[in-house]
Image (cartoon, rainbow, N blue to C red):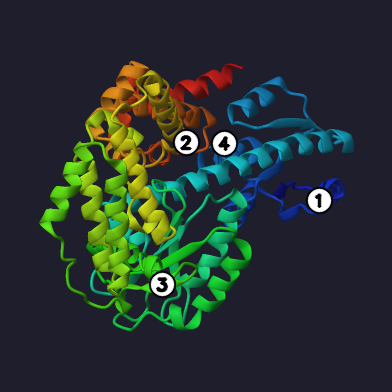
Amino acid sequence: MKVLIVEDEYYARKRLVKMVLDWDSSIIITGDVETGNEAITSISQEEPDLVLTDIRMPEMDGLELSRYVMDNHPSVFVVILSGYADFEFAQKAICFNVKRYILKPIKREDLHACLNELKEKWEERIRERQQYAKMLNRMVSFRLTSAIYELNRLDESLAELLKIRKKTNGYWVIVFKSYGPLSEQDVESLEFHLQGLLVSESNREGYGFLNPVIHNEWIGICFSTKYGERYEVPSMNTANVVRDLLSNLTERFSLGVSRLHSDASSLSMGYREAKYALAQHLCHGTNRLYEHEDLEESKDYEWKEELENKLHQELKAGRAVVVKRLIHSLFTNFYEENQVSVKQLVQLHSRIDAILRSEINIQMISDMPKKEIDEFASLDQLVDGLTSLVDRLCERLPATEHKGGENQDLINDLIAYVKENYACEISLDLLAKHRYYLNASYLSRLFKSKTGQGFSDFLTSCRMKKAKELIESNWFSISEIAGLVGYTQSSHFIQIFKKHYGETPGEYKSTCKDVKKTI
């Protein structure tokens, strides 16, 4: 904690410095100054957390200084030291958000008790600030995710933040995929070690984040200082990074790298390329990094129409064993013919999956989530996924008596997701497709039937409740609060807040200040 001491009497000022350091030697004294004007300069330059100020000083007294701090640095605590037990002074001090009013001569125990209390509040504020910093990072991650899935364009403010500028520096997209659950400790280790992929000779910085929609996936955007040069990470850093990951993670993993791009609009393409490169692990093994530039061109998979008709026919007859045998033979032949091509493997899997899902009605979709090819740890797991889908399809008799409970669990998960990520850009379409594997309209109807409230209304109510709490804290401006609860435009936030509560955020903030003054 940083403390500024303002006292016009030299020896009293030095005594205060000693008393503060006796209380906690780790405290940083940002300055001990004589006047209020000197204090203003020091506050602007050093940004203390606490100001201990005398009330009687030349040029500017302690009350004027307190008013300045309240108006310009509201997060700074102020304690007034006075030799006058004056009720009028104390009343004004409260109006200027002064935390304590200590009478002189100052007793060590009184000052230390005050400092103990304020340090607790300061530590609590630091924890909350850290939470809000994480929230802001999540907001950036969600906006990037929306751009990656092409739900929204990558706006100029975010592109500038991430240094993705048209026709200047290039960037690559890196995707890390774990084929098992990651603990919080795993995630911390993962993010630390993957930073090594974001720095090399030609690229000095990058931005990495966990995909908020797809579990166990990390996305990195790596910026090049020299556009047009080949990606240097594989030759320089990959071996060390993979070795570190192997020693710290118990689950198998793969890494994929896109081609070099120069335009913000290519972010989605870069993500798809990295995922496509990553799928090479099904042909060549996990615990490696794969580059899109290393993929060789290959012809399309030659699909036989009579085989598709055969699959449809056996599915309709409910002959699961025959269908599974056909699927196994297709993949066996694929490898026996030395057609180890990611492109053809993707085409083969997608075609079989589409045939199977053509038999699924909308009520069954939530029971049979679709997985992309890169989500499977091995070819055996990929085939098992298809044959498991065959078993479910051929049963044709879903356990309807458990359906209500399963749907309620899904809605509970969606509610928890919104309460945790309300500050971010949330799209029901994106969640339906990539998190719950449902039709968005169906998920919307299901949410309303289970909660009695539309999804958009629920999201708005969560944001407004948090906005109210942030206004009451008086730590943030209205525009900052708008961003912290998920609104990119403060004017839109103000309009929604007034519609929800009957007054603008500014009016509510004034009301809160008036209430505090009367307490």
Position of 244 compared to 14: left or right? Answer: left
Distance from Cα at disc 3 to Cα at disc 2: 38 Å
According to the picture, the residue beneath numbered tag 2 turns out to be 420
- Residue 99 visible in the shown view: yes
Residue at 37%, 39% in the rendered image: 486
Residue at 36%, 29% in the rendered image: 459
Q: Residue 270: which quarter of the image?
A: bottom left
Mark 4 residue element: helix
Q: Amino acid at mark 1?
A: Val
Position of 251 compared to 336: left or right? Answer: right
Q: Amino acid at mark 4?
A: Arg
Badge 2 or badge 4: first in the primary sequence? 4
Provide residue 262's location: percent of width, then percent of height: 26, 71
Provide residue 253's location: percent of width, then percent of height: 49, 62
Badge 4 or badge 1: first in the primary sequence? 1
Residue at 17%, 73% in the rendered image: 299
Provide residue 502's location: percent of width, then percent of height: 33, 17
According to the picture, the residue beneath numbered tag 3 turns out to be 284
